[in-house]
Amino acid sequence: MDQVHKKQLEINAAKVRLGIIEGVYGAKCGHPGGSLSVCDTLTYLYFNRMNIDPQNPSMPDRDRLVLSKGHTAPALYSVLANRGFFPVEDLKTLRHIDSYLQGHPVLGKIPGVDMSTGSLGQGISAACGMALSGKLDNDIYRVYAVLGDGELEEGLVWEAAMLAAHYQLDNLVAIVDNNGLQIDGKISEVMSPYPIDEKFKAFGWHVIVIDGHDFDAIEKAFNEAETVANQPTAIILKTTKGKGVSYMENQVGWHGKAPNEEEYNTAVAELKAKLDELTK
Amino acid sequence: MDKKATRDSYGEALVMLAEKRPDLIVLDADLAAATKTGIYKKAYPDRFFDCGIAEADMMGVAAGIATTGKLVFASSFAMFAAGRAFEIVRNSICYPHLNVKIGATHAGISVGEDGASHQCNEDIALMRVLPGMTVINPADDVETKAAVLAMADYVGPTYMRFGRLAIPTFNDPKTYKFELGKGIELRSGNDVAIIATGLMVNEAIEAGKILAEQGINARVINIHTIKPIDRDIIIRAAKETGKIITVEEHSVIGGLGSAVAEVVTETVPVPVIKIGVQDKFGHSGPAVPLLKEFGLCADNIVKVTKEALGK
């Protein structure tokens, strides 16, 4: 990836992070930690990879993304808003009683959302259905399913993983946000899903493990996924929960909590400083 | 009268449907031979996908296919379609109101020898409570085929309930017309109303004949659409007969009887006596003796009706 594109992605990602903080602060609740950890990959996909049109969000041959870890809706909403699907201003209404920005993604209500999710494990099944249907239509689109690492504890994920390999869904990419933390603590202590890479390999998937905050690595991984035939690909992102907001990084407490006013100001100041530095 | 299980009619109807709808996809979870989607699989192998023994995943896959605009039927036994996969049906199918048709076979006690683990008497209750879900329980071969074809044109989540046991075909294919949400009066009478669904409709017809011989004119109503229920036909029956007997191969909690009682209590409060599975599990045995044991037969309908009328 050339430096110009990389810098633009970094700028977009900083804006998306600001939107996440605005959303969660406006809601006084929500899930900032996992939104910030998956932010770079979502930014890359929506800005640099996916065949989508913000003016025509339900275009039939569009690439689809299912946020199976639906609680990180603040990240998806912020990416969609920054990409032009709806006004960035609306992010502040997240979870409000009169807002269309529901606590978890809803199909049909929010422009750009491809599937209702929130109950963990279900998004990957739906993504398999989309990919299967796409195969029957001569592969006109690709499907991305974004999962949490804690989500891998749901048995349904593995039912879907089995089906995706059985039907050779090479138009499907599962993205695992491996930030290592879930509500009750470290995933390795609560209920270890490790080794994640070996599990997907054993289920018949092509597996790529990368630094989920390195845009060069992210692009390389998605390029590689497109060359894989007859097999779905799992991209395991090694990430930092709360990435980009200093006091949230690697803190399990920021899984599902909104910042107070002081914390909000700190986060915004940090992200704006980053943005200033990038646009200088 | 010819006899056929509604699961067989379902499998045959899918083949009839496939001819009209090239976008039809059928999913099953390793039960194609039993749910009779195998009939379709044989005719259209490229448009059939086995999801393996993974009913929850099958419902999610069906939801994903539906988002792409294709018509999809997902089949398993009622126990697993409505029971095991309940939360996926709720969150991935009903919440986004996706056009998934669930074809659930082996409903009720008439599953027989497999016993209580497979005899699902709770599915109507589970599916009826979901916002936006349509619930269909056809009564014979003719009604099943008509219902499957009609529901393919309806856009929205639908639960269709079929049986394992071969039952008489009482509807005439030349004159029968399926209308979503419309009950059918099969026998007129003003002494009492017997409202039945699914496999119990034919038993209700037989009970109506026996009661007539004894001087009791029972109105017999077939409710094939449990949701949205035909309020008008129920209110009319309540007004004109003053006493309702409901009959279903399902728990008396949450099924047809409850749905009828909900309408009646809000409009014309009359007694509603519910014949069904009385809050207990079934057990192994041949279907017909089991149905008799649980009171799901014409003789018991006659008995309960006469008791209700004090005769």
Image (cartoon, grey):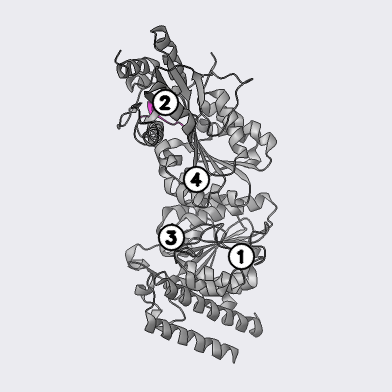
Tell which circle, 1 or 3, labels the residue nearer the N-terminal end: 3
The amino acid beneath tag 3 is: Leu
Which is more foreground, mark 1 or mark 2? 2
- Binning the other alpha carbons within 10 Å of mark 1 as few (below 14), some (14 to 19) or many (20 upward) gives many
Q: Is residue B286 above or below residue B253?
A: above
Where disc 1 sits, the SS reads helix
Q: How far separated are the C-alphas under marks 2 and 4?
A: 29 Å
Residue topped by disc 3 = A152
Classify residue B198 as left or right of residue A81.
left
Which is more foreground, mark 2 or mark 4? 2
Both on one chain, marks 1 and 2?
A: no
The amino acid beneath tag 4 is: Gly
Q: How far separated are the C-alphas under marks 1 and 4?
A: 38 Å
Both on one chain, marks 1 and 3?
A: yes
Q: Is residue B110 magenta?
A: yes
Residue topped by disc 1 = A225
Q: How far separated are the C-alphas under marks 4 and 3?
A: 30 Å
Q: Which chain is disc 4 placed on?
A: B
Tell which circle, 2 or 4, labels the residue nearer the N-terminal end: 4
- Binning the other alpha carbons within 10 Å of mark 4 as few (below 14), some (14 to 19) or many (20 upward) gives many
Q: Position of residue B117 (x, y in %)?
A: 36, 34
The amino acid beneath tag 1 is: Ala
The amino acid beneath tag 2 is: Lys
Q: Is residue B267 above or below residue A30?
A: above
Which stretch appears magenta?
A: B106-115
Q: Which quadrant would the C terminus of chain B be assigned to in this image?
A: top left
Residue topped by disc 4 = B132
Residue topped by disc 2 = B239
Both on one chain, marks 2 and 4?
A: yes
